[in-house]
Image: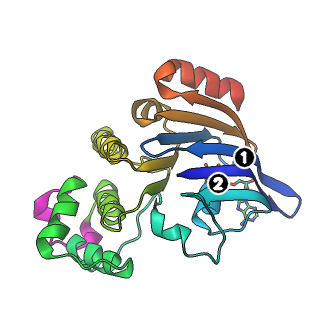
Amino acid sequence: MLEAIGLTKKYQEHVALNNLNLKVEAGEVFCLLGQNGAGKTTTINLFLGFTAASSGEAKVNGLVVSPNNEQTKQFLAYIPEVVMLYGHLSSIENLDFFSRIAGYAYKKDELEAFLLQAGLQPEAFYKRVGSYSKGMRQKVGIAIAVAKNARVILMDEPTSGLDPKATDEFSEIVKQLSQDGRSIFMATHDIFNAVNVGTRIGIMRQGELVHTLDAKDISAVDLQKLYLETI
Ligand SMILES: Nc1ncnc2c1ncn2[C@@H]1O[C@H](COP(=O)(O)OP(=O)(O)OP(=O)(O)O)[C@@H](O)[C@H]1O
């Protein structure tokens, strides 16, 4: 679903991402670790078409991403660290609005089902999103991703600032999304969660993907050790 072929991004002389080669298949959860400035967000921005590659290609479902190509965006959803929603609208209204933009008009019970599937408590459905916690906003973000039928969900530090219970709930939802055949690509600093939720884990240093591992082959303790040795 996602492929990077020699993907490189330079800002003037600074190489933010250097020759990334990577495939993420349907049903995989790829967790990308790396220090601040390692190039994780740059990678996500290249897949989203928010920025143009200096060389190489980012592909989504076999199609080459470019900032002016809307085709690849239909397969993608993006969950940033803080999901941007209309604070004066309820989650049902936000979900209705964003699904309509993506070309879907759902009935009320269908919208409620998306929010329920994303783990939002029903008593919050008709409350203003402005009063929601970060974890609740993320659930609305996931409901929007599912409602727009995204096959790939890109996430940038989704568990940062979440309490352990909210992180656990979030991880269970991510596992469910991947079991439904979606690909998840997540930039994170959360080593424990990467082992818990990931199927594959990458460690990036100064724009280079230095290690790629199967999550089932490594414990959180060993991953932390490898991470500290790498960065
Ligand atoms: N628009 C830009 N102009 C110039 N340099 C940039 C720009 N965006 C990113 N960079 C640089 O590219 C490098 C990679 O940044 P990036 O944001 O991808 O790192 P990151 O791994 O996501 O870090 P963090 O964990 O802090 O989010 C950094 O050195 C950063 O300063």
Instruction: Tell me where residue 72 appears, x and y as whole percent.
Output: 55, 67
Q: Please state the horizontal and vertical placement of residue 62, each as a whole percent of the image.
A: 59, 58
Residue at point 54%, 44% (across, down): 24
Q: Is residue 22 above or below residue 225?
A: below
- The image's mark for residue 43 is 2
Q: Is residue 171 above or below residue 191?
A: below
Q: Secondary structure at mark 2?
A: helix
Q: Say whether marks 1 and 2 touch (CB < 8 Å).
A: yes
Residue 125 is covered by the magenta coloring: yes
Count of residue discs: 2
Q: Position of residue 107 (x, y in %)?
A: 15, 76
Given the image, on which type of amino acid does mark 1 rest? Answer: Leu
Q: To which residue does mark 1 refer? A: 20
Is residue 158 shown left or right of residue 205? left
CB at mark 2 closer than 8 A to ligand 1? yes
Q: Inspect the image, locate mark 2, and give the three-letter code of the amino acid beneath it.
A: Thr
Neighbour tally class for label 1: few under 14, some 14-19, many 20 plus, Cα within 10 Å? many
**Which residue is the extreme one toward the front?**
62
Residue at the outermost right position:
13
Image x and y of residue 96, in percent: 26, 77
Q: Which residue is rendered at x = 17% and y = 57% of the image? A: 116
